[in-house]
Image (cartoon, rainbow, N blue to C red):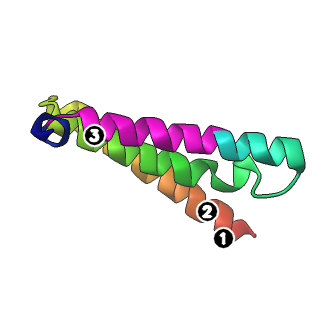
């Protein structure tokens, strides 16, 4: 069990669950017309996933440019989310 928490396996599961949640929410909205449209949460979801990818890269011992790239992508997605909310 310690291997599960010490390595990258836990964050892999969290990333997979988060991506699946995004797909499920989009499918629910498409099917029923209720809930949030994908565009309403896509940038926020992308920012969170990029932060988790940066964490995973750091835990796996990736070189700093990969971690920085993930963090940059998270920042861009976060900025896009804020810009979209501001436009409303």
Residue 72 visible in image? no
State the separation of the CA atoms marked 3 and 2.
32 Å
Q: Quadrant of residue 15?
A: top left
Label 3: few (<14), some (14–19) or many (≥20) C-alpha neighbours in 10 Å: some
**Which residues are drawn in magenta?**
7-23
Check contact, mark 2 vs mark 1: CB within 8 A. yes
Give the answer, above or below, for where 26 lies relative to 12: below
SS at mark 2 in the image: helix
Q: Earlier in the sequence, mark 3 or mark 1?
A: 3
Check contact, mark 3 vs mark 1: CB within 8 A. no
The disc at residue 86 is 1
Q: Is residue 48 magenta?
A: no
Q: Which is the main secondary structure of the residues drawn in magenta?
A: helix
Label 2: few (<14), some (14–19) or many (≥20) C-alpha neighbours in 10 Å: few
SS at mark 3 in the image: helix
Q: Which residue is mark 3?
A: 10
Which is closer to the viewer, label 3 or label 2?
Answer: 3
Label 1: few (<14), some (14–19) or many (≥20) C-alpha neighbours in 10 Å: few
Q: Quadrant of residue 21?
A: top right
Point 30% across, 40% down: residue: 11
Q: Is residue 10 magenta?
A: yes
Point out residue 82 in the picture as x, y percentages from the top left corner.
57, 64
The answer to whether 81 appears left or right of 73 in the picture is right
Residue 65 visible in image? yes
Q: Earlier in the sequence, mark 3 or mark 2?
A: 3
Give the answer, above or below, for where 74 lies relative to 63: below
The answer to whether 78 appears left or right of 15 in the picture is right
State the separation of the CA atoms marked 3 and 1.
35 Å
Point 84% across, 42% down: residue: 30
Q: Of 47 and 15, which appears nearest the observer?
A: 15
The disc at residue 83 is 2
């Amino acid at each position: 069990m310690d291997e599960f928490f010490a390595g990258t396996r836990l964050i892999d599961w969290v990333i997979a669950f988060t991506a699946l949640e995004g797909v499920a929410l989009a499918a629910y909205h498409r099917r029923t017309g209720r809930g949030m449209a994908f565009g309403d949460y896509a940038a926020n979801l992308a920012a969170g996933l990029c932060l988790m990818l940066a964490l995973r890269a750091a835990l796996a011992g990736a070189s700093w440019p990969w971690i920085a790239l993930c963090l940059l992508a998270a920042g861009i997605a976060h900025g896009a989310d804020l810009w979209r909310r501001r436009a409303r």
